[in-house]
Image: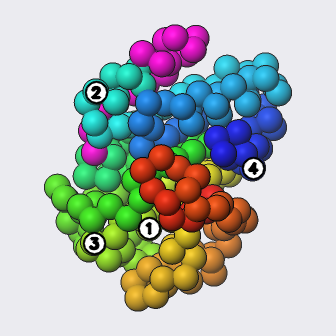
Amino acid sequence: VSRVMAQVIELGRATDARQSIFDPTCGSGSLLLKAHDEAKSRTGLDLALFGQEMDNATAALSRMNMVLHDCPTAEIWRDNTLANPHFLHATDKTALQTFDYVVANPPFSTKAWSNGFDPLNDLFGRFEYGVPPAKNGDFAFLLHILKSLKSTGKGAVILPHGVLFRGGAEGSIRANIVRRGFIKGIIGLPANLFYGTGIPACII
């Protein structure tokens, strides 16, 4: 799955070593490293890596993995990416830093996604297309990714299959982002593919 994600955002077409890859929920860093390897094997370019991870031990593991896999300059930050995003615009601290590529496998349907901040008054304007339900954060991560992409950027995120058909606030958000042409494609994934959950998922 990691390699598919790297391929669908066309990392093999990277043109400049100053281009960047970001994972807002990077875990141990495996997605970032797969994306980096895809770009380097196809273009020879060593793209800059950025990641944020909420769990302290996992963030430390990610930093270690970056060093072990010859990516010592990767910047991995430990904090809640929704409540306290670390990577901000160089001069405007009410805007997120934007990246050429984003890959992510956020926690599925997390219920505490809005802990620590008020989505209705989000400093970074991430919820202009709608506020996700209080007890389901799937679209919160997708909207964060959209705000983290450059205008020419490409992203791929793994989410539960339910984001494709659930109604209410999620249906409204889905309609808004589809109308704006943000979605290039959707890849359905089977059940029992990921550790800890048996539900089917998709790559958006």
**Badge 3 vs badge 4, beta-carbon distance below 8 Å:** no
Q: Amino acid at mark 1?
A: Phe
Q: Amino acid at mark 2?
A: Ala
Q: Which residue is mark 1?
A: 139
Q: Which residue is mark 2?
A: 57
Residue 175 in the figure: left or right of residue 123 = right
Mark 1 residue element:
helix
> Which of pointers 3 and 2 lies earlier in the amino acid sequence?
2
Q: Which residue is mark 4?
A: 8
Q: Please determine whether, in this image, residue 75 is positioned above or below residue 68.
A: below
The answer to whether residue 68 is magenta is: yes
Look at 25% across and 52% down and name the residue there: 83
Circle 1 crowding by C-alpha within 10 Å: few under 14, some 14–19, many from 20: many
Q: Position of residue 139 (x, y in %)?
A: 44, 67
Query: Disc 3 and disc 2: Cα gap in Å?
Result: 26 Å
Q: Position of residue 135 (x, y in %)?
A: 27, 72
Q: Please determine whether, in this image, residue 10 is positioned above or below residue 72.
A: below
Please give the range of residues in magenta: 64-80
Q: Kindly report which numbered mark, 1 or 2, lies closer to the viewer in this rendering.
A: 2
Q: Which residue is mark 3?
A: 135
> Which of pointers 3 and 4 lies earlier in the amino acid sequence?
4
Query: Disc 2 and disc 4: Cα gap in Å?
Result: 30 Å
Look at 46% across and 87% down and name the residue there: 167
